[in-house]
Image (cartoon, rainbow, N blue to C red):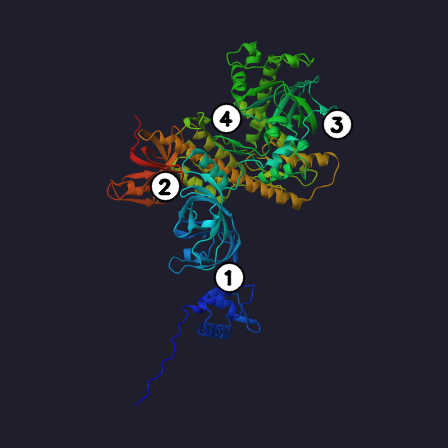
């Protein structure tokens, strides 16, 4: 009887082992691995798997794809050139990497993203795609996460003892896993702030914990708080910071006045928005015996109260800027300073930091002085009130402003008058306003003639009721009164920057680079559709033709579209100690000096200026450059939050207008639909190509249009159409329209 053959135990072969080992070694190419460490990475520990790994390591060594650095320790041999870039995530987990080494963005398939998320700084290598010949790449290392906290809606699975947070927006391709013991009392469906803690090697999703419950999705405060949380912006001051601020000595003291230039007797007033709560700049005006005008630009001396090394200063630096949302301001400084001690309120003495100029009738500067002052504000104007004086030429007509129908209130309280302070008549203030307006127009004319670009983009504002519901939309435009203040603030910022810059000492500059040629060409492609032509011959001709473009589109249907596209063409202004000038303003030197209540760079500029006025040597450029980078980053986040709040409020406003037809301008065209901006309120929404049922529409990239296959109907950038609201989503901040028809003017 023959013996049965004894069957050998079956061993599972590890699939794709070559690529897996190479991937492990290349991902951490500066480290060495032995077979046990690789087995642990693969999650195997049986003898057969270990033997396969040992054998494969020797094969790869023989092929010179890896090297044995020490006995049994292997390292990848790297022949690939690696690059650093930033991830721009698209849908379904794929995306692009923006990298200065390449002219075009590098496509990254979802399976090559290797746990990178939107905005992350990553290391990657690139290669040509086989079919299209375009660049494709693979992420090999995550250098720095763009963020560690996300906002989303929690979904709790009670029986399975875990939860997932579905992150807001379309840039996050994965949910965040949260163990049930880390949900921080959140209820199913709550909007929460969640921190990303780790992303285990074999897990599909990262894991995290709930930091804060924001509320129920769609509720006003929930969504506003979510916008701030999304960008890591604070809502309230820590109690210890508030307590510190409340203990600061705010008294105006004789011994401090003695150290300053006393300008309390000079005619001084503020011009600000009617709803402003903090006034960080004022103007003084005096006619000198020699016929020159002495004009003071007085800025709140925040640095007097904000001392370096304190918890208050640390908090202000971290915030770096105030954030202006539609329904509220999130200030950089506690209210006791921002609306109190540092606010140049009427009929109050204040510590100020001033730039004082002697100027002739031609707006030529004959002398300048910078330093700490003490001032007294005689009056407060709203822009509308100052505009009334300018338009009506009030002072020259001999009309007493106090009896003017605009009801400009320049009366002084009895308790102030009784102190014996010189009574400044309303006539003097009105005459000063008219002269300052005259000088401002001369300065603006000179600035424009030297290549400055005039951006007067319309700002969307909302009338809100007591519950912060939008009951109306209005547009904020820049009038002569606004431009008056703007010109004198620009003058102070320019001259302060110039004063320090010419000493070759470290300073905080607001810099703005020239626009990129490719962006200018793209702008020409779009505006050419409307019959406009740009001249790219040299820097001055570019500026001149951009100004002509902005002037020509004023009041036309395409104005907001062209204004927006032109602004996007510009480089982004930022803070730096490396001065390259300011292209948009046509200034060789420019700083931010005039708003220290709401901008930390202005505080730093004040400190450095005083340091140099005291005769000190130049401060450390590297230290201040790091601070500039931080302030630029925080400004960027604040701007994004402000835009999100406007978008959110626009959608809330449109919720109450679902049954109305609106005329809009096509502001964007893609292969998935057209974006339309409503003319009367600037609200922007999308018409999906899937909802355009009358024909099959295809995207024509060359003409920025969707074209019907049968009818040849074209919906092109800049066309006017009639739409109706289809859907409003406050949580995702989406506004969807139904296309009614093309608009035909009566």
Q: Is residue 701 left or right of residue 96?
A: left
Q: Which mark is residue 527?
A: none
**Position of 601 relative to 159 (above/below):** above
Q: Which residue is mark 3?
A: 259
> x, y percentage for residue 136?
44, 57
Badge nearest the viewer, 3 or 2: 3
For the residues labelled 2 and 4, the Cα–Cα distance comes to 30 Å
Q: Nearer the viewer, residue 322 or 292?
A: 322
Q: Are marks 4 and 1 in contact (CB under 8 Å)?
A: no
Residue 686 sits in quarter = top left
Work out whether residue 432 or residue 309 is closer to the camera in this orientation and state it: 309
Q: Earlier in the sequence, mark 1 or mark 3?
A: 1
Rendered image: mark on residue 478: 4
Asked whether disc 2 touches disc 4, contact meaning CB atoms under 8 Å apart, the reply is no
Using residue 533 as the reference point, say whether residue 609 is left or right of it: right
Q: Is residue 649 visible?
A: yes
Alpha-carbon distance for marks 3 and 4? 38 Å
Characterize the local packing of mark 4: few (<14), some (14-19) or many (20 or more) Cα atoms within 10 angstroms.
some
Q: Position of residue 347 (x, y in %)?
A: 63, 18
Which numbered disc flags the more N-terminal residue, 3 or 2? 3
């Amino acid at each position: 009887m023959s013996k049965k053959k004894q069957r050998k135990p079956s061993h599972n072969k590890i699939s794709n082992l070559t690529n897996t080992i190479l991937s492990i070694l290349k991902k951490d190419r500066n480290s060495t691995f032995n077979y046990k460490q690789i087995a642990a990475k693969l999650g195997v520990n049986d003898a057969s798997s270990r033997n396969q790994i040992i054998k494969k390591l020797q094969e790869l060594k023989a092929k010179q794809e890896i090297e044995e650095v020490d006995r049994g320790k292997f390292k990848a041999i790297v022949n690939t050139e690696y690059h650093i870039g930033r991830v721009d995530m698209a849908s379904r987990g794929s995306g692009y990497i923006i990298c200065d080494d390449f002219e075009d963005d590098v496509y990254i398939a979802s399976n090559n993203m290797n746990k990178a998320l939107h905005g992350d700084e990553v290391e990657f290598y690139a290669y040509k795609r086989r079919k299209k010949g375009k660049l494709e790449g693979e992420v090999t290392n995550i250098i720095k996460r763009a963020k560690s906290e996300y906002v989303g809606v929690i979904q709790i699975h009670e029986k399975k003892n875990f939860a997932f947070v579905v992150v807001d927006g379309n840039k996050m391709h994965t949910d965040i896993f949260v163990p049930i013991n880390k949900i921080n009392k959140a209820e199913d469906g709550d909007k929460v702030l969640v921190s990303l803690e780790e992303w285990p090697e074999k897990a599909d999703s990262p894991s995290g914990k709930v930091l804060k419950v924001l509320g129920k999705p769609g509720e006003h405060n929930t969504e506003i708080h979510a916008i701030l949380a999304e960008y890591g912006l604070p809502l309230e001051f820590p109690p210890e910071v508030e307590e510190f601020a409340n203990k600061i000595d705010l008294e105006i003291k004789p011994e401090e006045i003695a150290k300053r230039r006393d300008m309390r007797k000079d005619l001084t007033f503020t011009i600000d928005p009617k709803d402003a709560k903090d006034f960080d700049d004022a103007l003084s005006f005096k006619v000198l015996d020699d016929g020159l005008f002495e004009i003071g630009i007085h800025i709140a001396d925040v640095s007097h109260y904000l001392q370096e090394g304190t918890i208050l200063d640390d908090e202000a630096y971290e915030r770096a800027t105030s954030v202006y949302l539609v329904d509220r301001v999130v200030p950089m400084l506690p209210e006791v300073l921002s609306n109190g001690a540092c606010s140049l309120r009427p009929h109050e003495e204040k510590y100020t930091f001033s730039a004082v100029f002697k100027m002739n009738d031609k707006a030529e500067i004959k002398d300048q002085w910078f330093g700490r002052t003490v001032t007294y504000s005689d009056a407060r104007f709203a822009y509308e009130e100052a505009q009334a004086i300018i338009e009506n030429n009030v002072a020259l007509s001999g009309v007493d402003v106090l009896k003017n129908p605009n009801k400009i209130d320049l009366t002084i309280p009895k308790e102030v008058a009784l102190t014996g302070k010189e009574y400044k008549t309303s006539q003097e203030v009105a005459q000063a306003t008219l002269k300052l307006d005259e000088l401002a127009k001369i300065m603006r004319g000179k600035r424009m003639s030297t290549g400055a670009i005039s951006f007067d983009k319309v700002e969307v504002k909302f009338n809100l009721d007591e519950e912060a519901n939008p009951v109306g939309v209005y547009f904020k435009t820049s009038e002569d009164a606004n431009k008056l203040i703007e010109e004198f603030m620009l003058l102070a910022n320019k001259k302060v920057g110039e004063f320090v810059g010419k000493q070759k000492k470290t300073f905080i500059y607001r810099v703005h680079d020239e626009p990129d040629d490719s962006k200018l060409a793209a702008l020409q492609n779009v505006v050419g559709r409307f019959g406009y032509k740009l001249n790219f011959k040299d820097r001055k001709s570019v500026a001149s033709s951009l100004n002509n473009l902005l002037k020509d589109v004023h009041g036309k249907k395409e104005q907001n579209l062209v204004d927006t596209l032109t602004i996007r063409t510009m480089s982004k202004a930022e803070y730096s100690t490396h001065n390259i000038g300011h292209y948009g303003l046509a200034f060789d030197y420019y700083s931010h000096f005039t708003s220290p209540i709401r901008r930390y760079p202005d505080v730093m500029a004040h400190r450095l200026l005083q340091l140099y006025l005291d005769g000190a040597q130049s401060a450390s450029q590297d230290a201040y450059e790091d601070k500039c980078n931080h302030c630029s980053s925080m400004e960027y986040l604040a701007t994004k939050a402000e835009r999100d709040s406007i978008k959110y409020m626009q959608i809330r406003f449109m919720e109450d207008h679902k049954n109305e037809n609106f005329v809009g301008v096509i502001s964007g065209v893609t292969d998935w639909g057209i974006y339309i901006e409503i003319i009367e309120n600037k609200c922007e929404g999308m018409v999906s190509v899937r909802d355009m049922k009358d024909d099959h529409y295809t995207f024509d990239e060359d003409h920025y249009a969707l074209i019907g296959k049968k009818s040849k109907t074209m919906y092109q950038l800049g066309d006017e159409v009639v739409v109706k609201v289809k859907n409003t989503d406050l949580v995702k901040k989406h506004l969807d329209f139904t296309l009614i028809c093309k608009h035909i003017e009566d």
